[in-house]
Image (spheres, coloured by chain):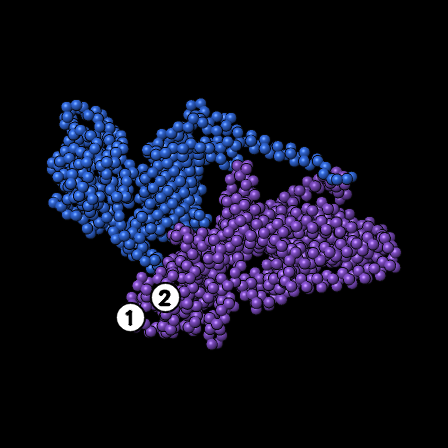
Chain colours: A blue, B purple
């Protein structure tokens, strides 16, 4: 009976937790969720789920591994999961379990910060970013219409453990929530819709079909999605400079335009500066001390940018050439320089330690499809190691040849898929060795080549090519 | 004075090395000044390709760099002239692109990966430095290195040349003027020395020139003309024979390797002069040889017979070949050089280009300033010496002056010779007046202070009898003349800088205006719209626009165009003109048949940008009328009083034309009712804007300069778009919309194209 029920629900929705069966992972029911509060925050253009849960070890052995499933239906994907002991603040690791049999559930194995003794309790705070879970409804809107997004989830938090008490809070971008599924214990107040509290929920909740809730809410901001970001961090010891260049391929993932773009109504309404679902400008808060900022695209410089840098802040405010409506694309390049000493320290011997933000980006909420960070170290740097604040999906090492290099600069390329801007402004630490001889390589090479050109010219000038005297 | 002199100029042998170092330094400074004065646009705007044609050259260079030389050579471009395409590799002068491609590769080899765009932008300024150097060499052959340096300085900053070589104006002329001057220098050298090596070098650079610019025909005709004049003056010599024969034989064979030129050098009238002179010089050489072998009496008879025979044979041969069509007759562009009204009547597409118009007088002063009045003096000085190379200057001056008067853009070929002639003048003046030594005043009479003129006359009088030192006696006159010319030279520099900065340094892709607070505001509508096309339309979209914007769309928007600035197919351009000039139902047919997805028009009415499509519209009408005189008539676009109007007085044909509708669509709604104004034409528009049935407005740039329309698909129910919009507008009766709907009803059966 259970299996047919599940099949129906999967076929019918494909969106819901397959919940109580087909469960292939052998998760021992060694925990009990004493109290669970889930917050689904959609004030950004992606879903940020925060789960605060008090767990209790109900087995007789000490336990260290707690499993947490997340719902990744349809086009959505988990960008990151982070976890910590809420009281102590000590972080714990969350690893994805490589098993898709329970689709659309994606399991995460959380290794507790400390071994949990039988009957002991611990409070975990888990944060997860999920992209692609919000769809514009209606999918096409007029140029000055309001944009609404829709989110579908389950009122019970999927869990392989018995839950004594749980509650789900959905936090919208503003108070305008025209549609939401009403169950018992559903309450809307202000920006939030609350499901629960529900007592004594069995593992996997109850009926998956009945668990579903859909909320449609107003979202006045554009949904900034960077299909790809290429970020170059270039260290120059001679120039005492840290150059950063970012190349973006941007799309607005919001509701598409119902008709074609009308400049007339855009021009007439823009005086009132109404909220719009189009991307009008992007604000890049840079590190203090950034300078020489530029903003270009494939056809040259874009003059509509402002850059302000003083002792307190550095802000690059760019305006794309045209407003980017839902489904429209735009690609651009921004870059700036920093003084190197603020980012680089001399370590032992000829060792250096570089500490730079792995990801910066606009202050508007943004999600990224793919990020490629290239860290270009000076020519001749060796023994490169790094510690990344974000899980790296792919790493490549290569030599980048530019500006009169002879062997090329030591470089690493780090690829990260599906990132949300919650992870920005975290520093990556890179250590490398760079000897004095390597420092002198370029001047010597240039000197030698200029000298050889001189010698060759001098010799050629002395050759007499005339035929007869 | 004499001590200073002895310190400065000890003896000729030791000063020579100082002089050559000074020369190198001065030339380097001139080159630097030439480059620097062309960078206004980069500093004010950015490193960007200018105007129209450079965008194609830039695109071709990118193609060359990306796909390599052989692919470039065989490039068939299916993204222009849709659906015909263009055999680009065979219809362009590859010299420019190959040059920048070679520079790109060379820099890459020494690990300097410079963006190809920056190479393209800075190519023209870089070559202007070389042009200055070539001018130096050329003038040095004419007079001396002092004149050479002056000529180089003039050439470096003369606005007539700067107009085509500022940073970003990446056009064939950018390198062609250097090649022109250098080829001429090599020719003079070859003619002077009678050296086959110099002749061969001349041919080599002639080949480079042929590969770079269509203006190579100027060289092809000027050198033979020089030789002809020399022969007629009785100055034939073995040197001329060697130089010309080696240049012509090698140069012609080499030039035929360029696909676009191919067999033209032996087939077209433009090249016949060179061939004819080549034959002539062989005959002259033969006759010269005979003269040494045959007694003079028989020789005269022989010569007469020979001349008559050859003239008859050559002339009949030429006429027969031309009549039978083996030799192509003169091309239209060439005819318009002789008859300035020719193009307007026969080839409107040539006449429609502003740079093909005859030159206005002020532009000579604008582009050449004081050089224009020094120029005749320089030519006169050449007459005084009149060696073989001076004949060249005279021939060049006469030809170039004529052509510059006929066509604005040929000011470019005049500029070098003006610089050279003016430099000869100025340097002669300085030679005379800057001599530190004053002649010893041997005469007792001349002790008293006489006026300068008399003194000069007096010394002139002495010339024949005693041949004394000639010079200027009075320091005052020296100071006055030298001072005056220094002021002129300074004024010239100021003028050149002012002209360059104000007239020639605008990219025209980007417009600049001033904000109320004086800060610069960039109007970037072109790139805004092109970039929108690039990012938000399918890659294979076809864009229809007037041909002016074809290259820019290809370069910036990277989309397929119907017509572009390579105006090789007049009918295709006329088709676009017809689509723009006809009413919607006719145009829609054309648009569907050419699979057009978007139509782009330039509209300056909001901002007062006068180079817009409504102002160019009459040319579209004329060109279309040339092909379809029955369907498009220029007269119908004028009011009965013969005025070209866009306001309520505009004719129905005008108001119903696609161009008018696209330009003014929704425009009046931007203003309060009845206040709509077109700022270019100063016309008050009707408050009811035009209605479009077959097109949707897809994008309009910030200042409405570029407007892009999407061509509607066929209606799903098989209706035509007029009845659809009538139905959606709630009207059941269709025949109620004035003249246009009436015509629509008449043609309804044909209009619904179902392809």
Q: Picture coordinates of residue B221 (x, y %)?
A: 67, 57
**Residue, disc 1:** B731
Instruction: Report helix, strand or loop for mark 2.
Output: loop
Q: Picture coordinates of residue A446 (x, y %)?
A: 56, 33
Query: Quadrant where the N terminus of chain B lies?
Result: top right
Question: How many residues crowd mark 2 within 10 Å: few (<14), some (14–19), many (20+)?
Answer: some
Q: Residue at (46%, 73%) from the top-left corner?
A: B636
Can you tell which mark lies on residue B235?
none
Q: Nearer the viewer, mark 1 or mark 2?
A: 2
Q: Residue at (69%, 58%) from the top-left corner?
A: B273
Q: Picture coordinates of residue A68 (x, y %)?
A: 21, 34
Query: Quadrant where the C terminus of chain B lies?
Result: bottom left
Q: Picture coordinates of residue B19 (x, y %)?
A: 71, 42
**Residue, disc 2:** B752
Instruction: Report helix, strand or loop for mark 1.
Output: loop
Q: Is residue B541 above or below residue A233?
A: below
| Residue B381 quadrant | bottom right
Q: Is residue A445 above or below residue B580?
A: above
Would you say residue B520 is visible in this rendering?
Answer: no
Q: Nearer the viewer, residue B635 or B358?
A: B635
Dots 1 and 2: beta carbons under 8 Å?
no
Q: Is residue B622 above or below residue A50?
A: below
Q: Is residue B686 above or below residue B182?
A: below
């Amino acid at each position: 009976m259970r299996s047919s029920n599940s099949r129906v629900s999967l076929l019918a929705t494909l969106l819901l937790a397959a919940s109580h069966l087909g469960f292939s992972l052998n998760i021992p029911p060694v925990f009990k969720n004493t109290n669970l509060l889930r917050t689904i925050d959609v004030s950004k253009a992606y879903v940020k789920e925060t789960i605060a849960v008090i767990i209790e070890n109900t087995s007789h052995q000490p336990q260290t591994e707690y499993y947490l499933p997340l719902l990744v239906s349809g086009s959505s994907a988990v960008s990151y999961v982070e976890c910590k002991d809420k009281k102590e603040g000590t972080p714990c690791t969350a690893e994805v379990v490589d098993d898709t049999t329970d689709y659309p559930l994606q399991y995460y194995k959380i290794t507790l910060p400390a071994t949990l003794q039988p009957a002991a309790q611990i409070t975990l705070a888990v944060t997860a970013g999920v992209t692609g879970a919000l769809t514009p409804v209606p999918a096409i809107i007029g140029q000055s219409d309001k944009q609404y997004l829709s989110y579908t989830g389950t009122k019970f938090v999927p869990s392989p453990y018995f839950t004594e008490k749980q509650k789900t809070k959905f936090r919208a971008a503003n108070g305008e929530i025209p549609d939401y599924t009403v169950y018992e214990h559903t309450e809307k107040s202000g920006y939030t819709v609350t499901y629960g509290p529900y007592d004594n929920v069995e593992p996997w909740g109850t009926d998956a079909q009945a668990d579903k809730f859909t909320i449609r809410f107003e979202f006045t901001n554009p949904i900034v999605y960077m299909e790809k970001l290429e970020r170059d961090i270039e260290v120059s010891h001679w120039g005492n400079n840290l150059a950063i260049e970012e190349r973006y391929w941007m799309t607005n993932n919001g509701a598409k335009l119902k008709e074609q773009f009308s400049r007339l109504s855009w021009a007439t309404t823009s005086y009132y500066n109404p909220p719009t679902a189009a991307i009008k400008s992007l604000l890049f808060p840079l590190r203090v001390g950034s300078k020489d900022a530029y903003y270009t695209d494939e056809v040259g410089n874009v003059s509509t940018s402002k850059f302000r840098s003083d002792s307190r802040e550095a802000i690059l405010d760019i305006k794309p050439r045209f407003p980017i409506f839902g489904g429209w694309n735009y690609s651009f390049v921004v870059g700036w320089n920093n003084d190197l000493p603020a980012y680089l320290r001399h370590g032992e011997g000829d060792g250096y330690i570089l500490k730079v933000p792995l990801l910066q980006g606009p202050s508007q909420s943004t999600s990224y499809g793919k990020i490629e960070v290239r860290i270009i170290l000076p020519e001749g740097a060796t023994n490169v190691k790094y510690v990344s604040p974000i899980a790296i999906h792919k790493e490549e090492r290569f030599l980048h040849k530019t500006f009169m290099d002879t062997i090329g600069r030591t470089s690493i390329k780090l690829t990260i898929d599906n990132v949300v801007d919650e992870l920005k402004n975290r520093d990556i630490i890179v250590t490398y060795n760079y000897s004095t001889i390597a420092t002198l390589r370029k001047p010597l090479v240039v000197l030698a080549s200029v000298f050889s050109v001189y010698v060759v010219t001098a010799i050629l000038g002395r050759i007499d090519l005339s035929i007869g005297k | 004075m004499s001590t200073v002199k002895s310190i400065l100029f000890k003896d000729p042998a030791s000063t020579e090395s100082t002089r050559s170092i000074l020369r190198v330094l001065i030339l380097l400074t001139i080159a630097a000044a030439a480059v620097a004065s062309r960078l206004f646009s980069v500093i004010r705007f950015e490193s960007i390709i200018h105007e129209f044609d450079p965008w194609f050259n830039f695109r071709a260079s990118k193609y060359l760099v990306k796909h390599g030389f052989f692919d470039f050579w065989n490039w068939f471009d299916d993204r222009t002239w849709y659906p015909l395409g263009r055999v680009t590799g065979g219809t362009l002068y590859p010299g420019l692109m190959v040059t920048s491609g070679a520079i790109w590769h060379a820099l890459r080899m020494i690990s300097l990966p410079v963006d190809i765009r920056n190479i393209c932008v800075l190519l023209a300024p870089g070559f202007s430095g070389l042009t200055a150097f070539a001018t130096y060499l050329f003038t040095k052959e004419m007079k001396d290195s002092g004149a050479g340096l002056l000529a180089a300085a003039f050439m470096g900053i003369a606005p007539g040349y700067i107009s085509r070589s500022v940073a970003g104006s990446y056009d064939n002329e950018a390198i062609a003027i250097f090649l022109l001057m250098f080829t001429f220098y090599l020719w003079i050298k070859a003619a002077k020395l009678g050296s086959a090596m110099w002749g061969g070098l001349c041919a080599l650079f002639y080949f480079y020139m042929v590969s770079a610019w269509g203006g190579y025909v100027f060289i092809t005709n000027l050198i033979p003309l020089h030789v002809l004049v020399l022969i007629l003056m009785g100055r034939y010599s073995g040197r001329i024979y060697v130089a010309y024969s080696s240049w012509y034989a090698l140069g012609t064979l080499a030039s035929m390797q360029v696909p676009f030129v191919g067999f033209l050098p032996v087939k077209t009238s433009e090249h016949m002069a060179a061939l004819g002179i080549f034959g002539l010089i062989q005959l002259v050489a033969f006759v010269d040889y005979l003269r040494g072998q045959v007694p003079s009496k028989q020789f005269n008879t022989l010569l007469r017979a020979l001349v008559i025979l050859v003239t008859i044979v050559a002339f009949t041969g030429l006429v027969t070949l031309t009549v039978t069509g083996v030799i192509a007759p003169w091309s239209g562009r060439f005819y318009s050089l002789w008859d300035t009204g020719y193009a307007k009547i026969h080839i409107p597409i040539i006449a429609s280009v502003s740079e093909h118009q005859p030159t206005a007088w002020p532009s000579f002063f604008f582009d050449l300033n004081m050089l224009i009045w020094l120029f005749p003096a320089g030519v006169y000085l050449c007459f005084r010496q009149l060696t073989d190379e001076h004949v060249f200057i005279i021939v060049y001056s006469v030809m170039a002056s004529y052509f510059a008067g006929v066509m604005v853009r040929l000011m470019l070929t005049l500029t070098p010779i003006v610089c050279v002639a003016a430099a000869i003048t100025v340097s002669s003046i300085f030679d005379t007046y800057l001599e530190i030594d004053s002649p010893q005043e041997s005469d007792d009479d001349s002790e008293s202070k006489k006026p300068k003129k008399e003194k000069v006359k007096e010394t002139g009088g002495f010339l024949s009898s005693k041949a004394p030192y000639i010079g200027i006696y009075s320091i005052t006159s020296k100071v006055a003349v030298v001072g005056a010319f220094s002021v002129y030279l300074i004024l010239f520099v100021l003028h050149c800088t002012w002209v360059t900065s104000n007239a020639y340094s605008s990219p025209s892709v980007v417009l600049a205006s001033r904000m109320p607070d004086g800060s610069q505001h960039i109007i970037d509508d072109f790139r805004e719209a092109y970039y929108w096309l690039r990012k938000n339309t399918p890659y294979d979209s076809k864009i229809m626009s007037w041909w002016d914007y074809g290259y820019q769309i290809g370069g910036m928007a990277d989309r397929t165009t119907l017509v572009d600035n390579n105006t090789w197919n007049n009918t295709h351009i006329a088709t676009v003109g017809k689509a723009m000039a006809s009413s919607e139902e006719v145009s829609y047919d054309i648009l569907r048949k050419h699979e057009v997805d978007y139509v782009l028009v330039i509209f300056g009415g909001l901002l007062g940008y006068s180079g817009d499509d409504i102002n160019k519209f009459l040319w579209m009408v004329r060109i279309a009328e040339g092909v379809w005189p029955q369907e498009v008539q220029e007269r119908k676009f004028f009011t009965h009083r013969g005025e070209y109007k866009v306001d309520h007085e505009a004719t129905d044909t005008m108001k119903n034309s696609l161009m008018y509708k696209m330009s003014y669509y929704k425009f009046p709604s931007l203003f309060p009712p009845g206040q709509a104004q077109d700022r270019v034409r100063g016309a008050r528009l009707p408050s009811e804007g035009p209605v479009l049935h077959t097109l949707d407005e897809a994008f309009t740039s910030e200042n409405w300069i570029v407007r892009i329309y999407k061509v509607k698909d066929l209606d799903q129910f098989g209706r035509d778009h007029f009845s659809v919009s009538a139905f959606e507008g709630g009207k059941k009766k269709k025949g109620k919309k004035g003249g246009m709907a009436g015509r629509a009803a008449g043609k309804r059966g044909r209009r619904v194209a179902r392809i």
